[in-house]
Image: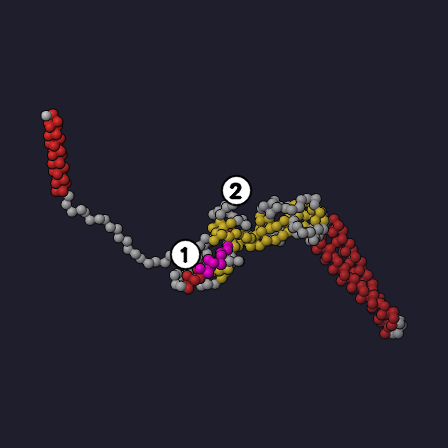
């Protein structure tokens, strides 16, 4: 009897739950309705030119490089510049001992003066013998000897002048000056060192940084790919004239440099199209090849 009562209760509870579910479903269906339309974003497509930019690695190089070398032998007495600073063309850099060259210059001047002193006497003698020869008072041989002595003296004077000039140039070369303006590097010789005219190592090196070159390279495969795409009409060269863009320079790790100057040998990149990958030749909008020289005002902002 108890089991029968529990079964009846379970049946009643199941019926009530089923009825509740049906009523809930009917109420939800009545509240639904038509769903709202989905939101759609619209983009208007327009055609406009898009520049093609290629970043290329490169290195900066000085416009002019001059090695300071001695033109006479001697001992360096003094150095007049500070390493790593800018120097002007004609500025004194080194002084070589000039005592021997000064003595040679004085000796050449003395020899020239001696020849010039003998000139007047020999000229007068040759003139007198010429008059006596006309009167048959002297022999032809005597006059010929006087004329030859006059020519010899004149030749000695010319030789003396050349010797004086050579001695003066050697004396002047004992003062070594800067051949160009620019930044001078480390001095390879100190005061008291012996230098010679044919030594392999220069005294110092000067690099002119304004203007300066930027050498960039590009692979041949990349150049051929761009040419092929241009021939296929995938892009075209703009007919508008655009200004020349300067290169952007980066820094080497662990190196502190002046933010207002670009140092030769530092890495950089350029967004100009390259024509010749071996020499850093850039291509203009009309296919003219050129190698850009960037003044110092374009290389700032490091």
Q: Nearer the viewer, residue 119 or 62?
A: 62
Q: Whole-Å distance between the Cαs marked 2 and 1?
A: 33 Å
- Whether residue 9 is visible: no
In percent of width and height, residue 258 lies at 52, 45
> How would you rate the neighbour count of disc 1 (Cα within 10 Å): few for under 14, some for 14-19, many for 20 or more?
few
Q: Is residue 161 left or right of residue 279?
A: right
Give the residue pinned by disc 2.
254
223 is within the stretch colored magenta: yes
Q: Main secondary structure of the magenta part?
A: helix
Residue at x-position 63% and y-position 49%: 204
Q: Is residue 91 left or right of residue 281?
A: right
Residue at x-position 49% and y-position 49%: 249
Mark closest to the chain's N terminus, 2 or 1: 1
In the picture, the quarter occupied by the N terminus is top left
Residue positioned most to the front: 1
| SS at mark 1 in the image | loop
**211 vs 26: above or below:** below
Magenta stretch in the rendered image: 216-225
In percent of width and height, residue 16 lies at 11, 33
> How would you rate the neighbour count of disc 2 (Cα within 10 Å): few for under 14, some for 14-19, many for 20 or more?
few
Q: Is residue 252 left or right of residue 115?
A: left
- In this figure, which colouring scheme has been used for the structure? secondary structure
- Whether residue 277 is visible: yes
In percent of width and height, residue 250 lies at 49, 47
Give the residue pinned by disc 1.
52
Residue positioned most to the top: 2
């Amino acid at each position: 009897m108890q089991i029968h009562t529990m079964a009846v209760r379970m049946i009643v509870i199941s019926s009530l739950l089923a009825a509740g579910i049906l009523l809930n479903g009917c109420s939800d269906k009545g509240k639904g309705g038509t769903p709202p339309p989905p939101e759609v974003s619209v983009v208007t497509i327009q055609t406009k030119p898009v520049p093609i930019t290629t970043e290329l690695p490169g290195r900066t190089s000085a416009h002019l490089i001059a090695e300071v070398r001695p033109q006479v032998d001697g001992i360096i007495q003094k150095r007049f510049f500070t390493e790593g600073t800018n120097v002007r063309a004609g500025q004194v850099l080194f002084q070589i001992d000039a005592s021997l060259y000064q003595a040679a210059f004085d000796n050449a001047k003395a020899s020239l003066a001696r020849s010039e002193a003998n000139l007047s006497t020999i000229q007068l003698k040759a003139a007198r013998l010429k008059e006596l020869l006309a009167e048959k008072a002297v022999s032809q041989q005597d006059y010929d000897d006087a004329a030859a002595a006059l020519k010899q003296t004149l030749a000695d004077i010319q030789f003396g002048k050349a010797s004086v000039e050579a001695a003066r140039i050697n004396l002047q070369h004992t003062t070594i000056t800067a051949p160009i303006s620019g930044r001078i590097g480390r001095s390879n010789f100190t005061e008291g060192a012996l230098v010679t005219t044919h030594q392999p190592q220069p005294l110092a090196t000067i690099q002119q940084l304004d203007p300066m070159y930027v050498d960039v390279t590009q692979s041949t495969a990349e150049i051929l790919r761009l040419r092929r795409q241009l021939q296929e009409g995938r892009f075209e060269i703009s007919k508008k004239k655009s200004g020349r863009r300067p290169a952007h320079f980066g820094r080497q790790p662990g190196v502190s440099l002046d933010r207002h100057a670009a140092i030769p040998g530092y890495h950089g990149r350029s967004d100009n199209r390259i024509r010749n990958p071996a020499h850093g030749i850039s291509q203009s909008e009309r296919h003219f090849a050129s190698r850009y020289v960037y003044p110092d005002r374009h290389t700032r902002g490091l």
